[in-house]
Image (spheres, rainbow, N blue to C red):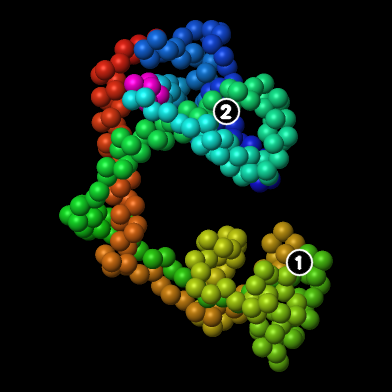
Amino acid sequence: MKYMKNYLFISAILAASFLGAVEVDGIAARVGVKPIYKTEILSELQMAPQGMRYEQMRSRMIERLLILNAATQAKLHLQDWAVQNRIDEIIKSTFAGDRNKLMAYLTQSGLSYAKWSERIKENMIISAMRWQTIDRNINPSPAQMRNEYLKNPQHYRSPRRVTVSVILLSPDKASLMGEVSQALKNQPFADVARKYSSDSRSSLGGKWEDVVPEEVFKTEVCDEISRMPKGTLSKWLEIEGWCFLIRLDDVKPPKDNTFEEAYDEIDRRVRSELSEKLFKEWIDRLKRDTYIKVY
């Protein structure tokens, strides 16, 4: 499943390279002397988030060409070793380090290695241009930071956290529920968990300490935890053949973080907002200086 998800990720990188310069459905736009074909846009849309429209994708592809043109004018050059290092990272993370799997996928998709690697290089150039033009120049002021904190306090609340102890029986051990319940009557929960549980923390007595339930447990388990008073033991939960028994040991309610506690998150949000604002202004300048025609 992870391998297939990674394929979907890499497909997003590959899609715009799939079609050559053969006009099938006609030109959708022109940026300088470079055309964007309708079939290229439709190919990108297949990999785009659900709900993205044709016009939005066309605008995104126009922006991409504008940045690549700006990089050419700025004489931005990437060393071959840097591009190769990035390709090696993708092969490692997406194709389990197996170059043959990459080549098989490219063949299946009708792509040449040269076109694919050129697409990777373009992505790196776009990232470098954005960093040089925008991101490295962003330095939020104390006033901007404080204003963000006061304006959006909901972003800087710590969620409810709990400490729970869990006994998890795999489907082949579901018949042991009664035996486990009986053992808990006269043995410490941690000892019973170490003996019976298939949970990843059984060696720790089944303890999950100071966690946000929604980040680590299934929805059914989270729902049960939300209904439990502190110090109580749940009923057995059966989910897809797995059997859960939960003890709620501690609860930390949601809390508003101080400015100091939330500083890193505030900084990230302010930088992101400034980056998007400056990016739009940059693209608008590039559009004014470039011949663009939309058909």
Dot 2 falls on a residue whose secondary structure is: helix
On screen, 44 above or below 217?
A: above
Say which quarter of the image contains residue 247: bottom right
In front here: 236 or 18? 18
In front here: 227 or 217? 217
Q: Where residue 133 is drawn, which disc sits there?
A: none
Say which quarter of the image contains residue 150: bottom left
In front here: 91 or 213? 91
Q: Which residue is mark 1?
A: 170
Q: Residue at x 32, y 63 (%)?
A: 262
Residue 71 within the magenta-colored segment of the rendering: yes
- Closer to the eye: label 1 or 2: 2
On screen, 2 above or below 201?
A: above
Residue 277 within the magenta-colored segment of the rendering: no
Q: Residue at x 27, y 36 (%)?
A: 278
As measured in the structure, the alpha-carbon distance from the residue carrying label 1 to the one carrying label 2 is 45 Å
**Mark 1 residue type:** Ser
Say which quarter of the image contains residue 100: top right
**Mark 2 residue type:** Ser
Span highlighted in magenta in the image: 67-73
> Dominant secondary structure of the magenta stretch?
helix
In front here: 113 or 201? 113
Q: Residue placed farthest to the bottom in the image?
A: 186
Q: Which residue is mark 2?
A: 117
Report crowding for label 2: few under 14, some 14 to 19, many 20 or more residues within 10 A (C-alpha): some
On screen, 114 above or below 24?
A: below
Of the 4 image quadrants, the one containing the N terminus is top right
Q: Position of residue 245 (x, y in %)?
A: 66, 74
Instruction: Judge from the rendering whether residue 144 lies leftward or rightward of residue 122; answer left or right.
Output: left
Report crowding for label 1: few under 14, some 14 to 19, many 20 or more residues within 10 A (C-alpha): some
Q: Position of residue 52 (x, y in %)?
A: 46, 30
